[in-house]
Image (cartoon, rainbow, N blue to C red):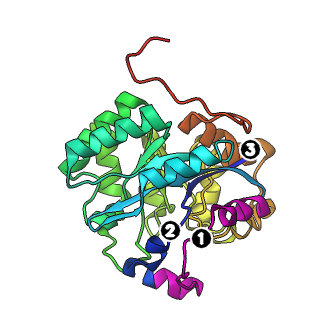
């Protein structure tokens, strides 16, 4: 079962936001008149033989583009296909901590995503640190973006060194999943993933045929085989398009399974096969 660790079911307000104008130009996408049914996202997954996806909420300084409530509803409707990744208001740190805690303990969300360029704040900004501590407490990964920004925002916040390196030093127990491969700093990203036990890379926003050669080489090493996770950044890239050319990477059967499934299942604590009823984890400190 292939797992997509970074995808969105897009709302109309997400697709219409000005920040995505450059992505619409690249992909030729248009703004829909109404919200897209979730069946469209499931169809993309089915076409690419992707069994499970982590749906990300999007919260930014101007409000929610995809809300945690919407993600929770989609997960409840399709628990055998989706799990949720929360987004929070970085400008309200304690409210953000409480929201993350509620989504994990009550709704079964499996991670937190903050996109640094959206806030113009690198992950070393002090507003992140209470959230990092809560992620460690809850046992969920912090998911973020590395590399240049496609949207018309500064790219500096996406540098793996110093930012990811520093938070991994400050919070060695924190699992960090870095999306979008880090280009043009991919070698920096690989170095940070090698250095830190709990730092991972996901391939969202890159088709298989566009993966940097140094990342493909890393995936064929003993360390890299367990450090890279498959992602699409759907709807920017459809699932079948993202996976086209996979056979040409030259991965061993085990490395291929780790990349498409096993690493994500381990890092996010996901079921190893499709299930019809995902259990919601008990609050930390509770007894079963």
> Residue 67 occupies which quadrant of the picture?
bottom left
Picture quarter with the N terminus:
top right
Q: Residue 11 carries which label?
A: 2
Image location (x, y in percent) of residue 281 = 50, 27
Tell me the SS state at disc 2.
loop
Is 50 placed left or right of 122 in the picture?
right
Q: Residues within 10 Å of mark 1 (few under 14, many from 20)?
A: few
> Is 71 a magenta residue?
no
Which of these two is toward me, 98 or 208?
98
Q: Which residue is drawn at 29% across and 38% down?
A: 98
Please, what secondary structure does the residue beneath circle 3 have? Answer: helix
Calculate the distance from the C-alpha at mark 3 to the C-alpha at mark 2: 31 Å
Q: Does the magenta stretch include residue 42?
A: yes
Give the mark nearer the N terminus: 1 vs 3: 1
Using the image, determine if residue 6 lies above or below residue 208: above
Point 41% across, 24% down: residue: 283
Residue underneath mark 3: 257
Q: Is residue 172 left or right of residue 71?
A: left
Q: Where is residue 60 in the image (x, y as percent from the top left)?
A: 31, 63
Q: Can residue 27 be seen in this view?
A: yes
Q: Mark 1 points at which residue?
A: 36
Boundaries of the magenta span:
22-48
* SS class, disc 1: loop
Front-lying residue, 151 or 64: 64
User: Do the residues bearing badges 1 and 2 touch, measured as CB atoms within 8 Å?
Assistant: yes
> Could you classify mark 2 by the number of other residues whose Cα lies within 10 Å: few (under 14), some (14-19), or many (20 or more)?
some
Spatial separation of the CA atoms under disc 1 and disc 3: 31 Å
Query: Is residue 269 depicted above or below 35 in this figure?
Result: above
Q: Give the vertical position of 154 relative to 75 (above or below).
A: below
Residue 180 place in picture, x, y as percent: 50, 63
């Amino acid at each position: 079962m292939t797992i997509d660790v970074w995808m969105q079911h897009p709302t109309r307000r997400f697709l219409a936001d000005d920040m995505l104008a450059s992505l619409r130009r690249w992909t030729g996408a248009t703004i829909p008149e109404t919200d897209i049914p979730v069946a469209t996202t499931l169809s993309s997954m089915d076409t690419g033989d992707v069994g499970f996806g982590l749906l990300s909420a999007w919260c930014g300084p101007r409000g929610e583009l995809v809300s945690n409530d919407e993600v929770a509803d989609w997960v409840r409707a399709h628990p055998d296909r989706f799990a949720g990744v929360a987004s929070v208001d970085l400008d309200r740190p304690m409210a953000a901590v409480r929201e993350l805690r509620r989504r994990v303990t009550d709704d079964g969300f499996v991670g937190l995503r903050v996109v640094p360029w959206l806030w113009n704040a690198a992950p070393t900004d002090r507003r992140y640190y209470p959230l990092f501590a809560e992620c460690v407490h809850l046992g969920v990964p912090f998911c973020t973006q590395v590399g240049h920004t496609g949207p018309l925002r500064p790219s500096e916040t996406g540098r793996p060194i110093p930012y990811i390196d520093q938070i991994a030093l400050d919070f060695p127990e924190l699992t960090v999943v870095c999306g979008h491969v880090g280009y043009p700093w991919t070698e920096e990203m690989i170095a940070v993933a090698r250095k830190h036990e709990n730092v991972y890379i996901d391939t969202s926003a890159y088709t298989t045929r566009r993966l940097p050669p140094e990342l493909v080489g890393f995936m064929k090493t003993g360390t890299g085989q367990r450090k890279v996770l498959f992602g699409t950044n759907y709807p920017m890239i459809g699932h079948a398009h993202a996976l086209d050319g996979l056979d040409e990477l030259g991965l061993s059967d085990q490395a291929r399974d780790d990349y498409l499934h096993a690493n994500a299942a381990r890092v996010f604590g996901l079921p190893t096969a499709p299930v019809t009823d995902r259990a919601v984890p008990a609050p930390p400190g509770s007894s079963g």
